[in-house]
Amino acid sequence: MGLTGGLLERLISLLLFQPPESKTQPDAEAGKDPHVHEPKTSKSLPNVRQARQRTGRKRKAGIGLGRITPKKIRTVKPNVLTQETSSEITPSIGETESSEMKLLSKNLQDNLNALKSILHYGTNADAVVREFDIPTIPKTEASIVFIEGLASTNIIDFAILQPLMLIANLDDDRKAENTLELVKRRLLPGNQVTEKDNLRAITEGVLSGATCLLIEGSDIALTVETRSWEHRGIEKPSAEMVVRGPQEAFNETLRSNLALIRRRMRTPDLITEMLKVGTLSRVDCAVLYIEGLTNPELVDEVKRRISETKSDHIQDTGVLEQFIEEKPYVLAPQTLSTERPDRMASFLAEGYVGIMLDGSPFGLVLPATFWSLLQSAEDYFLRWPFGAFLRVIRTLALILAIFLPAIYLALTNFHPEMIPTDLLLAIAASREKVPFPTAVEVLIMELSIELIREAGVRIPGIIGPTLGIVGALILGQAAVAASIVSPILVVIVAITALGAFAVPNFNMSFAIRLYRFLYIVLAAALGFYGVAIGVFIQLVTYVNLKSFGVPYMSPVAPYTRSSGDALFRYPLWKSEIRPSFLKPQQEERQPRISRGWVSNRTKNNKNDSSQIKSGQSKKENPQDER
Amino acid sequence: MGSKGQIGTREAIAATVYFLSTKLLTSFPQHMAEMGQTAAWIVPIISFAVATLGFLIMTALIRCYPGRSIVEASEEAGGPVLGTIASLGYFAFFFATTVLLIREFSETVSTALLPSTPLSVIMGVFILATLVATYLGIEAITRAASLGMPLIIGTLILLNLLLLPQSNFDAIFPLLGPGSGKLIYNGIIHSGIAGEVMFLSIIAKQLDEKHKVQTMGLVSLLLAGSFMIVSTLNYSAIFPYPMSVHITYPGYEASTLIYMGRFLQRIEVAFVFLWVISACVYLALSGYTTAIIISDMLKLPSHKPLLPAFAILGFTFALVPSDVPQATYVDFMIVRTYGGLAIFVMPLLLLLIARLRASHDTNRR
């Protein structure tokens, strides 16, 4: 056995599949671009021609896109967006990392030229440079740099230029020895002023809407918070509507979204860590979690995946999720997207990690489990029997949406004996004039309904949904009248579509639609046997799937402790623990006796007579009873 | 060695129960009737009791070599020659049952669902599903078993309840059928019907709570044994002896008898749907067990490269029996009979050797 075993072992080890190295390079390595070359910073003001030539050279050299390299992840509490430090800023587009990391000199013109060069001043119409004098004694030259449209002109005029150019005159103490300190302490009324010492940090600030103030003789620049751009207000949710519960949804502004969450989680332990994603888009990405509650390994894993995502343009969480999910080839969504701040807050309170992206009205919740994708915010806002009932209805909807056409096909084609005779005759009569096989008929109708759905979404204006419904009805009616499909199939397809709509998660709904077609093919080929085989393969795939290290079918398979909040919804006062599959640092959500007044009442009832006699109302501490 | 998944206690029990009781869907009750006549339901009681003893021996052997599977423990105890013979015996048992069950399940599907479809297509699809599951690993299979367990138990209970109106329990008399002596003898020599319990000792080192392997096995034997005994009893009451000997798939035939009014009848397809899933779980478990035995024997880092070869072998060997009766005969009268020797007697022998060696070492010290 030894020799044979050894030979076989060697042979099989040669045949073994060696998975490719999945680990990416460490940050420091990843940040280095082999194509980067030292920039030739123009001493004079660049004109349009020079700028174009420079851009062309860079394109040829293949360095047009700088790489984002989060050097260090910040831990920032409430005012996260403004507490930037220079070391955390990523390199700029079109400039090398080394040049951007270059420290400022004490010469204003040198600094200004370098900054103009980075921002393509002259070519880039959005970049604005305003040079002026601060009336110190002697006068000090200064400049502000900002991007039009991102920065508020009102704030710049009244909170930067006016104090520096006019109010500075009113002060007697205008000696120019320490102008920076004078400006920062007494002349800039902006509520958030940050010191920056290198070009990269300044560029990053300016590109995100801040205004940079450069002062002659100072190698430190001041970045004043002036971010203000046009954005949509807070509106009602469009994809996760509820009858009872908050009616606020995220919008495209990260700050507003974070405020919406923080308004519901007034704990100092709610942490928002900021990362940058996209080498071109360079969008702020907020990772949210509760310090002391969320599993730190989960947080680290989320941050690791985001920071190691290398792409030029990530503008929505829908794009980001495709970069950070574990199994891209599995149809099941592996992240949960939500547009509801209340839902995000409740997930965070359970120990999940949230991701918000600037410009995206949907947040991501990680990890996602299969059961969480079938849950809606309203489940918790209603009394528990109603919530549990909704869950059952939704599960039924899921089953119908996936299997109903396949079951119809399998029954009519392979197992008609199972259909009651009267129904079988009705089906046979309705199919009498239909020239197509059942499988073709089902596919025609399913494709039509998908077409109507897609067209309904794409048709502009308010007529979209109306046209969809009318189109469906007319098409269905006409198809039946023309004997293209049988009436019973219209009913089947309508129920299936309703089932898909009843699934609360948009991604899950999509997955269901695709699974449905697979099951139709299986049923058409092998009847119930094919469907059963499909169910088995889907089952093993799902139980094998993990979302950020957490089994997808948790807490059912594998079984883990939870509050029973999976397929059903238990009473909230019985939901005492957080999902243990998340390995939260605090597993207990509430004490075993969360309704303290019940124990008080019981105790009081027991001692009722004695209390009446003594005339005392004895107050019990519910915690003592535990 | 294979993938070192951590299998929870629930998942392990669910998988073992599946592994032990899925053969109810095949011609198992028919063979019980052949051996026990009117006392067909007593045969599994005796067989499961013997299998319980056999399992206790297996766990005793594993305990001598903590952290090892029974394949590795056999090699440690018996040395390279005896250990390899024992492991080949385990392999032969599981490989043979896998191959025969592929054929039997495929024949069931062919009879019940797809009479016009070629058998090779049905078998091919079964093997494909099994291949996917075994490739994903034991973690996925056991979790699938645990997820499907409530559904299958519910179906089994429902089936038995719905069949109660068709049952005539006078058919189980005389209670001891061919006589107690013959009954006990048949029960003992067919203890291989519960031989799948060895699965737990094969994956012992992948269990989350390794120290509970004995409890897991006993619970699984109790649950699966109860299902099999109750179901065999019910089938005996529905199809009285000697008619029961001539019905190849009593489970399927019984489900065709369900009549709950004019609207709810001929619902056997719904049951077959769940049986197919159970059969897939069974085949995935047995396929994985077969591969992992060889993988452990050859000390391979993964069982996955073996799977395509086993799939082709399984497909080929499954076509060897000329018909269903031959396949079931080989399964129950040969494999389950002599297989019991391999999987229960060999560990006993190895345990004795291990104990002797241990006492010898102690004396030398």
Image (cartoon, coloured by chain):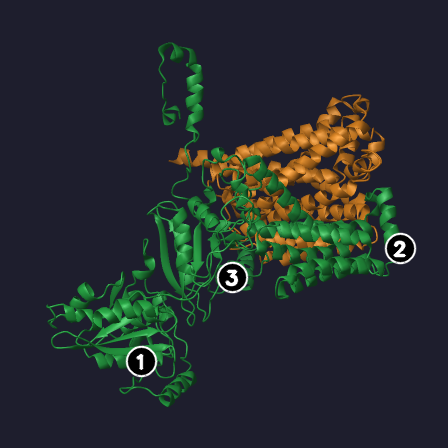
Chain colours: A green, B orange
Q: Tell if the residue under mark 1 belongs to the same chain as the one under mark 2.
A: yes
Q: Report the front residue among B34 and A584.
A: A584
Residue B189 position (above or below residue A288) = above
- The type of residue carrying mark 1 is Lys
Label 3 in the same subunit as label 1: yes
User: Is A246 placed above or below B214 here?
Assistant: below
What chain does mark 3 sit on? Answer: A
Q: Chain of mark 2?
A: A
Give the CA separation, mark 3 to mark 1: 34 Å
Q: Residue at the spot x=47%, y=66% of the render?
A: A315
Residue situated in front as seen by the camera: B160 or A202: A202
Dot in front, 3 or 1: 1
* First along the sequence among labels 1 and 2: 1
- Disc 3 marks which residue? A318
Question: In this picture, is A50 found above or below A322?
Answer: below
Asked if one can make out residue A491 in the rendered structure from this viewpoint, the answer is yes
Measure the alpha-carbon separation of dots 3 and 2: 46 Å
Query: Judging from the image, what secondary structure is the residue with disc 1 in?
Result: helix
Residue A297 visible to the viewer: no
x, y percent for residue B9: 53, 38
- Residue B228 position, x and y percent, is 69, 32
The residue that label 1 is drawn on is: A116
Crowd tier of the residue under label 3, counting other residues whose Cα lies within 10 Å: few below 14, some 14–19, many 20 or above: some
Mark 1 and mark 2: span between their CA atoms?
Answer: 77 Å
* A585 on left or right of A114: right
Residue designated by label 2:
A432
Residue A311 in the figure: left or right of residue A399:
left
Q: Amino acid at mark 3?
A: Gly
